Amino acid sequence: MSQQEITLNEAFDRYMAEIEQKLSPQSITRHERLGRTLAKGLGRDTTLASITPLLLDGYREKRLKGASAATVEKDFVFLADVFEHAINKWQLGLEVNPVNNLGSTARTHRRDRRLRAGEQVRLLAACDRLNNPFLGLIVRISLLTALKKNEILILKNEDIDLQKRIVVVPKTSSRAIRIVPLSRQAVKVFAEAMRQENRPDNVKLIFYGEEGRYDTRRPYAIDRIFRQVLLTARMKSYRFSDLRYEAICRFREAGCNELEIIAIAGTRTIRGRRHPQQKVDALLARMDELDIGMLDYDESISTNKAKKVKDTNDDTLATKRGTKPVSRGSFGVAVGIKAR
């Protein structure tokens, strides 16, 4: 059988067999799931040579009716890799990758959720009502540094130098080590996080979770508790990743240029161009010049209770089936919800 006649299903199987030794078990599972989704949508017996941008555009429009733009973008990133592998390794005979002729789904349907009036106060107040101060600190750090959730959770005391006002983000699976400058307000938040009481002596993580098997501790798990906080703050449509977008927008509004924002936030390119390295000392001086301090709610982070304000909403929180309704407290914070 010629390479022109290879079907989509056969191409996925062959592709995975040739690259799986380079992938982690989680990546293998994710790639196999993406392959099944694409094979079902485009047809398992469809040949690679017959896949055109028009066919892919129809698949995308159909897929967007039941999935987010970011999810559909992942489908096409995987499919583009398969085509590149087939063209370069299998001598497929195509001059161009058909996926490259499509416009980016994520860019045309990108998420641009900003904090609205009063939401920051409600969000921080709901976080501060928890017995564990970690979530409030993590939210503030994300707003002040544009660090991603996973980048914050893997930080250790040794990664932070408050004197030099920098954070060294450790190497991850997809990113190299990078240095992030800190504004004066970010330094205060990190200092508060690093001097938390009752920290076990053998724990190096700043934000650590409950003790697990074999006396090990993983990073603090925030997904469930963050969803609960969003409900109490009446921000159900918000996501943690929106905090990073909010921080980047505030850097821009404060007067930072695009290259400075790239260096602070850690993005790789801008408009397809490579960017020069930015000196940390110069970035710190620029942040001081612009007086970047973006948290309006600047009270003691972990000890003081949020000030009570009159809540005009008398509705109750939605609760699980079979449980009694939970009334709202100040800032819409649920009374009686167990704090993490």
Image (spheres, rainbow, N blue to C red):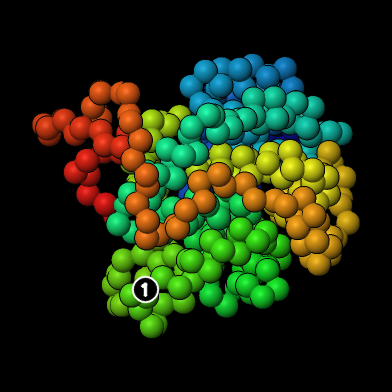
Left or right for 322, reference 8? left
State the residue lying farthest toward the bottom: 201
Q: Residues within 10 Å of mark 1 (few under 14, many from 20)?
A: few
Q: Measuring 75% from the left and 26% from the top, which residue is drawn there?
A: 103
Q: Is residue 269 visible?
A: no
Residue 136, x across and y down, in percent: 44, 53
Residue 320, x across and y down, in percent: 19, 33
Q: Report the number of numbered marks.
A: 1
Q: Nearer the viewer, residue 174 or 244?
A: 244
Q: Measuring 26% from the left and 36% from the top, which residue is drawn there?
A: 329
Residue 185, x across and y down, in percent: 61, 58
Q: Measuring 54% from the left and 29% from the top, which residue is drawn there?
A: 116
Image quarter in which the N terminus is found: top right
Q: Nearer the viewer, residue 27 or 231?
A: 231
Q: Is residue 253 above or below residue 20?
A: above
| Residue 281: quarter of image | bottom right
| Residue 24: quarter of image | bottom right
Amino acid identity at mark 1: Glu
Image quarter in which the C terminus is found: bottom left
Residue 201, x across and y down, in percent: 38, 83
Q: Measuring 79% from the left and 46% from the top, which residue is drawn there?
A: 256
The residue tagged 1 is 197
Q: Is residue 240 above or below residue 4?
A: below
| Residue 215: quarter of image | bottom left
Q: Is residue 340 visible?
A: yes
Left or right for 335, reference 295? left
Label 1, secondary structure: give it.
Answer: loop
Q: Is residue 207 above or below residue 340?
A: below
